[in-house]
Image (cartoon, helix red, strand yellow):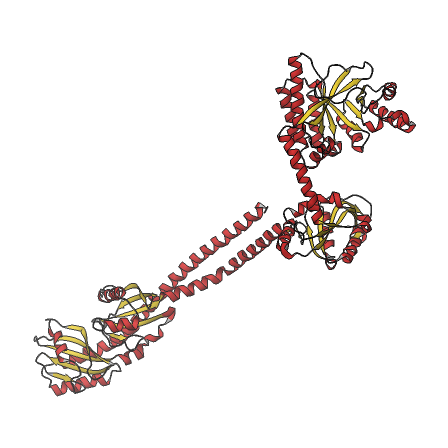
Amino acid sequence: MVKKKYIVAIIILAIVVIASSVFNYNRNYTSNISESMDLLKDLSDSVKSQYDATFFEICIAVEKAIEDTSNGSISDEKKVEILNKYVSTSYFVEDLAILYDDGKYLSSLGIVNTDIEKASTFFSGDESLLCAGMLESISDESLMYAVNRIVDDSGEKYLFLVGLNYNNLNMITRPENYHAQHSYVYLVTGDGYFLYHPDNKVIGKNIINDKELIQQRTGIDDIDYDKLLQLLNKTPSKVRSKSLEYKSNGEEMQAYANRLEAFNGVVVLTSNFSKIKDELFKETLRTILPLIGCLIIGIIVFLRYLFLIKYTDYFTEVKNDRAFRKYMIKTENDNEDEKYLILKIENIIDSEDRDFLYDDSIFYKISSYFKGLKHEYKELYRISRVHYIFRIKDIQSMFDLIRRIKGNVGSGEESIILRGKIMCLNIDKSKETFSTMDIDNKIVHSMDDYYTELINYRDLKVTNYSDILSSFKDDTMKKNYVENLISNKEIVPYFQPIVDTSSREIFMHEVLLRVKTQDKRYTTQEIIEIAEKEALVQKIDRLIIAQAFGEYNRRQYSYGKRTKLSINISGKSVDGKLKDYIIENAEKYYIEPEDITFELTETAALEGDKNAIVYLNILREKGFKLAIDDFGTGYSHISLLSKIHPDYIKIDGVFVQDVWQEEKRMKTLNALVYLCKNYNSKIIAEHVEDAKVLAILKKMEVEYAQGYYYSRAVPEIRSTL
């Protein structure tokens, strides 16, 4: 499992980075966009001021020329002379002309250079109007005539035409220099003529009359073109500027229109908003790249952690059981046998002071040492806390590896000595029976059957994995057999009397396990051993307890007779659930606790299990009796005497049977009896089969005896012998 704190840490890091990036981007983007738009407005104002200054200069000269030629007493020749004078002094004006309503035309060029018919349309109106509109030149594409309608004091009306060279005008104003922020300028007269545009083919064209060409050159669709017309037409002189967003050739554009004060025209500064946004995005992205880098590094570290946690023992960084299974599945169809050295570490000894080491940190040191021997094997796996698997190169390198392992691990004062079991396993993938299912667990569980002590490595033999699979198959069949016995309640209690050696009366009955329809392949003892090995013994204990309690209840309430029973429970069964089960069933069957004794078998399982001792003492407090079975056959019995203070101790039959035949056996039995009496426990001798043994037991003051001398185990409880 991935530790929650690491998941939380990476999520928090991602949230912080994303939130910071979004906040930073939004703040910088908004700020930069605002600054860019302000700059564009300032540029628009600047180019307007440039054009206004130029046109203001032109207007002063034109007004003087109008004033000088407005005297009716001046001849036409003199007027032409005045016009030439003003043209010669202006860089921007190439022609000045006067058109009267009767068709008379005076020009500094001496020729009619514009369409008189179009010009005549400007006579409509009774008041003077400067910059009433524009007329195209007939002879010069770079010349446009600004039309001024003049009405003098006498009521005479004429048109004063100013021939502007827009190339010269733009050469001085230099609108092409206003290209900051991907912007450009164009100048449009009040009646729609382009006096400047970055595309030369648009200059001189009319925005209304030449719509198709202009759309083709600028890439503006009909909808945005209408917006542009409205912007130019609806920018009254009292409004300083107006903005517009539109698209040109698929890119977003932002336009600012400023009406000129000295000329009937509009200066439009338009910028490529798409490029501005792209640049701002890149600039903003550069500011958040360090945060993104932190996130990427964090994710890489987290992914590495996920890999380690899945396929590596996180503490020692050695490949784990998942990695081993993955490799087995990957190579399952190779049909090539591979040899492995399996090591189970049982004891770790400090080579200096010979103390036993148990803490987990020592396994990091061991694993580091093993990894340092990489040249001796192909791959290393740690499939449990104490089990290591080495995929070896060959038999010789395996023995070289073992010699390094069995010696001092490490060097100097910090070196340690390993003690444990080894197994040389040939994984014969070529066998039809080969399967990778649960392979690591099968290997671990098979160690007890196929191991060699590490110190006796020279006796090591090769074990085929196919043999282990065959053994597991047999174990599975045995397990299924016992499970069926339990589920079908084929396991039943038999009762063997325990007799008072003094009165020869039945004191109580031991409840023994029997099978109704027992398979002749398995004895009762083998069934118990299978149950112990396959963790089924508690189910059997529960089944026997329930049936024994039921028989106790039946005798008490059917015959009015109380019966003392001694029921076997395995040390492997003792836990909180079994304790609760006993108490609940005792209440269910109205059991008097003092009539029930629990005989503890497999007491080695209780060694070091403090909780089990607590549960047993709880049962004693409830009134139940405790007995130790098979006393004398294991060291665990001695340590249990002081922990549970048993009411009865059953001396194993191996010390009782035919005891009279050998003096040494007599002495051993006498010593065991003496030891039991020192703990104030009653003694029950097992396997009593003749009168001679009984006489010796009575002489040693053994209180109770059990065996064929009195009775075999029978299906029903007996009242008398």
Q: Nearer the viewer, residue 540 or 215?
A: 540
Would you say 598 lies left or right of 229 here? right
Classify 607 as above or below 176. above
Q: How many marks?
A: 0
Would you say 404 lies left or right of 88 here? right
Q: Nearer the viewer, residue 97 or 77?
A: 97
Report the quarter where the C terminus lies: top right
Residue drawn at (11%, 81%) of the image: 71
User: Residue 179 at x, y = what percent?
Assistant: 36, 72
Q: Nearer the viewer, residue 199 or 176?
A: 199
Would you say 688 lies left or right of 192 here? right
User: Residue 264 at x, y = what percent?
Assistant: 22, 71
Residue drawn at (77%, 26%) of the image: 628
Would you say 663 lies left or right of 215 here? right
Query: In terms of image quadrants, where is residue 472?
Result: top right
Query: In terms of image quadrants, where is residue 98?
Result: bottom left
State whether residue 351 appears in this view.
no
Query: Which residue is farthest top?
Result: 560
Query: In terms of image quadrants, where is residue 202?
Result: bottom left
User: Residue 105 at x, y = what percent?
Assistant: 12, 83
Query: Which residue is farthest right?
Result: 663
State whether residue 33 appears in this view.
yes
User: Residue 241 at x, y = what percent?
Assistant: 28, 64
Classify 560 as above or below 684. above
Classify 504 as above or below 374. above
Q: Nearer the viewer, residue 586 or 442?
A: 442
